[in-house]
Image: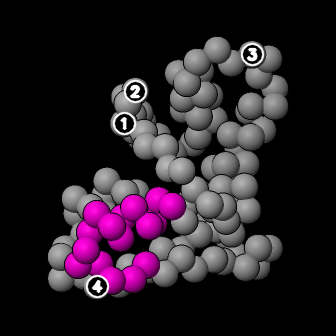
Amino acid sequence: MRKYVVNHISDKIQELILWSDSCGGQNRNIKIVLLLKSILEEKPTLGKIRLRLLVSGHSFLPNDSDFGNVESALKIQQKLFSPEDYIKIMKNCREKSYQDRSYAEGRFCYYQ
C-alpha cells in the first residue's frame, strides 16, 4: 500500500480515505498506524489519511467468499513448507482467475 500511495497518488491529492473490513487481527493495530504515519512523512503534500472501518457483521465484500474458500482448503492441507504451497492452494480453490502478485524478499518493510 505504501509503495502504491507514494508512487501513484498525485501530489494534488490532499486527503486519502482508506476502507478496512474491520478485522481486528489485520487492521486495528499499531503496525497499520505506523505504516500510515510513514506514508504521511514520505508524501508531504498528503495532509490527511482517514481509515474508515466497516461494521463487523453488517457488510459483505466480494472477496469474503474467496477468503472462506482458502481457509477451508487450508484446513484439509496437512503440511505447508513454503509460500509457494499457499499460492498453489489459492490457485486450486478459486473458480475465477487468480493473479499471483508475489513479492521478492527484501520488498517488505518493518514498522516499529
How many numbered discs, if any?
4
The quarter of the displayed image where residue 102 is located: top left
Label 3 Cα neighbours within 10 Å, binned few <14 / some 14-19 / many ≥20 = few
Distance of label 2 from label 4 (alpha carbons): 32 Å
Q: Dot 3 lies on which element?
A: loop
Q: Is residue 59 visible?
A: yes
Residue nearest the viewer, comparing 102 with 50: 50
Distance of label 2 from label 1 (alpha carbons): 6 Å
Q: In which quadrant of the rendered image does the N terminus lie?
A: bottom left
Counting residues from the start of the chain, the first of labels 3 and 1 encountered is: 3
Residue 53 within the magenta-colored segment of the rendering: no
Percent x, y for residue 17?
44, 80
What range of the chain is rendered magenta? 34-49
Percent x, y for residue 106?
37, 30
Residue nearest the viewer, comparing 48 with 104: 48
Above or below, 23 relative to 82: below
Residue nearest the viewer, comparing 35 with 69: 35
- Name the residue carrying label 2: 105
Is residue 45 rendered to the left or right of residue 17?
A: left
Tag 2–tag 1 contact (CB < 8 Å) = yes
Counting residues from the start of the chain, the first of labels 2 and 4 encountered is: 4
- Name the residue carrying label 3: 79
Percent x, y for residue 33?
54, 65
Q: Dot 1 lies on which element?
A: loop
- Name the residue carrying label 4: 14
Distance of label 2 from label 3 (alpha carbons): 22 Å
Counting residues from the start of the chain, the first of labels 4 and 1 encountered is: 4
- Tag 1: residue type? Arg
Q: Dot 4 lies on which element?
A: loop
- Tag 2: residue type? Glu
Please state which of the two labelled residues, at mark 2 or mark 3, is closer to the viewer: 2
Residue found 23% across the figure and 78% down from its top: 45
